[in-house]
Amino acid sequence: MHRKGETVDEVVGIAGEFRGLAKDPGLETFAERAIDIVGTGGRGGSAYNVSTVTCFICAASGIPVIKHGNRAITSSSGSADFLGQLGFGMLTEPALLRRSVEKLNFCFLFAPYFHPAFKSIMPVRKELAAEGQRTVFNILGPLLNPARPAYQLLGSFARDWAQPLADALSELGLRRGYAVHCELDPAGSLDELSTAGLNLACGVGEWRGESSRFGADAVGLPACKAGDLFGGSAEENVAELQKMLRGNGNKHLANSICLNAAAAFHVTGKADSLVGGIALAREVFQGGQTAEWLEKAQDINHDLNSVS
């Protein structure tokens, strides 16, 4: 399918089948107000966990986040690896997931548990990824959140797939969102918004058919080089998070995270625009609110995991 080129109809059809096979996390009460922030991956081993930290900012600001993710496949630190390093357990019981959202505005749905049909697929996907071969599952993963939150910020591994992924999310019934991609200069790309290149944002649901291209200067942020945004292992990425929360970490990475948080604020209606959301995102991220939230989240996760 990848060699011939997947179509939106094919992706929507396969996503619908896997959604139907998924385990229900029992989060209907929150789904109408919740967002998922996730990328397709496929960037290689030097990615930072931008989407997960963006989720923390949203949760700390009061937006319910139902994040769907996995361990690293094409990078050094997947969302599950990063969360595990921070002390988050992989909750699976609906009652505990609901308590997590009630207390923290956040829960994490570990994809292999909620999609048992993927069990036989994972070994060959890892083997193909090691050979540099993308598959339809790079595209499908972000479309399969079993809780079906109404909002989503989805990062595309390729510019040409941002619009099709936006169309697929619209066909799957999302209320509002963005599918985004960043082209780096002189080469390369990111499956998220960043201050290191030209961003593309394609509207989803109520914003279907809208799109924009912009660089860092258009939203009042200083531009940087791609190398300024590199991450590492889960342990290294957590150490950098702690520095950024204290205000003395990688300022370019913090700017890119705030840009993504601003997009999430815009999608959920917390901000009227990307520019309007950046100042709020920075205040929540580096003004102490996210650090306080994270400390509380670690304590509550310890309690929830002792029950599970």
Image (cartoon, grey):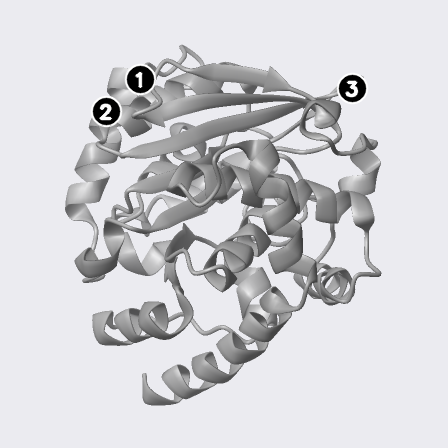
Q: Mark 3 points at which residue?
A: 185
Do the residues bearing badges 3 and 1 touch, measured as CB atoms within 8 Å? no
Give left or right: position of 90 versus 218.
Answer: left
- Residue 197 visible to the viewer: yes
Residue 76 lies, in percent from the top left, at: 66, 51
Q: Name the residue under label 2.
A: 171
Q: In terms of sequence position, does the residue under pointer 1 or pointer 2 come before the other?
A: 1
Q: Mark 1 points at which residue?
A: 8
The quarter of the image holding the C terminus is bottom left
Q: Relative to residue 169, is residue 248 depicted above or below?
A: below
Q: In terms of sequence position, does the residue under pointer 3 or pointer 2 come before the other?
A: 2
Tell which of 129 and 106 is nearer to you: 106
Q: Which amino acid does label 1 sit on?
A: Val
Q: Which residue is drawn at 42% across and 70% down?
A: 104
Label 1: which secondary element: helix
Q: Which amino acid does label 2 sit on?
A: Glu
Give left or right: position of 136 versus 216.
Answer: left
Foreground: disc 3 or disc 1: 3
Label 2: which secondary element: helix
